[in-house]
Image (spheres, rainbow, N blue to C red):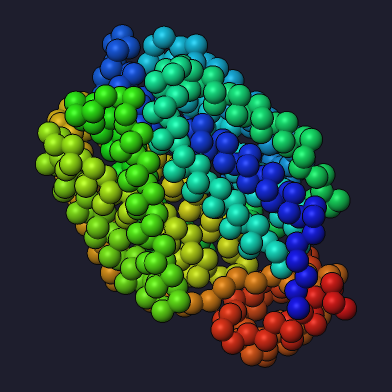
Amino acid sequence: MTVKMTSTELRATIALSSIMAMRMLGLFMILPVFALYAHDLPDVTPFLIGLAIGIYGLSQAILQIPFGMLSDHFGRKPIITIGLLIFIIGSIVAALSTSIIGIIIGRALQGAGAIAAALLALLADLTREEHRTKAMATIGSSIAMSFIIAFALGTVLNHWVGVPGIFWFTALLAIGGLLILHFIVPNPVNSHFHRDTEPVPTQFKRVLTDTQLLRLNFGIATLHFLLMALFIELPVALKAQLPTSQHWQVYLPVMIGAIAMIIPLIIFAEKRHHLKLVFVGAIGLLGVSQISFLYAHQDLTHIVFSLFLFFTAFNLLEASLPSLVSKIVRPESKGTAMGVYSTAQFMGAFLGGAGGGWLHHHYSMDIVFVVGATLASIWFLLAATMQQPHYLSSHLLNIGSVNEQEAKQLTQKLSNIIGVIEAVVIAEDGVAYLKVDKQSVDFAALEQFSVANV
């Protein structure tokens, strides 16, 4: 039987999850209130509002993979520290700015503190292979919770301290992250490359030419395009129906209701092997939400209904997409695939803010929703024609020091174990990267090859 996480692994997982959550909370809190604040700034346009909302995605997309690679050479904590300091500087610049250009610069700096890849690499350093998936899932859950909390907390803080105060609060959160990093997160005994969490340059071609993965990358970019474009107009439309201080009474119940709706759907999709059906259906619902928003401007009930459709689809797709990437990609290419996927996500956020603002500025917000419905339709067709995913899970084994010949022999032995569908042993890593069927795999047989059990 696999042993439980050690206290060090638990502390590292919880602490690093909290750092990631606080950073994402800071990025998302302004979404429900920024458009209202920005309308009173001098020389503002819908394009500049959208650019301010989405610009963090551009700098994040450009720098997240390089930051991860730098952490391999200069250490995880120093690179994460630099990233958090850049994030703090960006938050302060935005808080002090009285112009939209200043806020755009601040938001770009926030995104430039791109610590996600380095943080995941540090988590991999601090957890054993058999617990890596659980630790990464905890990070994912913390991001999801921060997203939900951000919409309610952002509107409440805006009532108390305004948008500049939210940026100051964001800086304080990042300072808290620095304290957690240096006083709670353990120092790794060994820090080395992990291809399950970090990109491998030689595998980019394979990942970028995989048509199944490209569909998912297009999907996550589209999803975040629609999210950012929505919040250029939605806060203004909502303000016409409800005082700003009460907007949290819309966002919080909608988010909780959406989460309650998707939990049984996720269970149904995974347990009954209907992931593609649920996934494609959620994309269809996303498109319906865009059409619904076209008619929602003048009625609070319609706005709430459209928002519920959107966030039900959004949260379901946000949860399903990483699972699909993991199921489709070769086991030794997971880190590369997730790096490309994250880059597509942040580029989608940038394009949604800047592109949505440009469309609104030159045409109308209705056109933004028409474009959104069109993108969702294209994604629907791409997803409907994708291959059925294999319901397999990634599994890692620490096999210790082996040479190339021993790695080949071990690959054959692991492949012969019941429930192991794919096995790749990388001698230089000392790790076996497996795809297994959890319903049938003989975990006891697998553990015989782990150095922890030798």
Residue 322 drawn at (x, y percent)? 48, 59
Q: Is residue 228 above or below residue 107?
A: below
154 horizontally vs 295: left or right: right
Given residues 190 and 437, the one toward you in this image is: 437
Please, is residue 87 above or below residue 378 in the view? above
**Left or right side of 208 for 139:** right
* Image coordinates for residue 275, horizontal then vertical, percent: 39, 71
Name the side, left or right, on which 222 lies relative to 137.
Answer: left
Residue 179, position in %: x, y? Answer: 73, 31
- For the point 55% across and 52% down, the residue is 140
Query: Which corner quadrant of the image does residue 404 belong to?
Result: bottom right
Q: Going by the image, does 175 lie left or right of 42?
A: right
- The quadrant in which the N terminus is found is bottom right
Q: Residue at x 60, y 70 (%)?
A: 394
Q: Quadrant of residue 70?
A: top right
Q: Can you say whether 129 is above or below 415 in the image? A: above
Confirm whether residue 357 shows in the render: no
Residue 48, position as x, y percentages in the image: 32, 22
Camera-side residue of 156 and 309 = 156
Q: Which is nearer the eye, 392 or 192?
A: 392
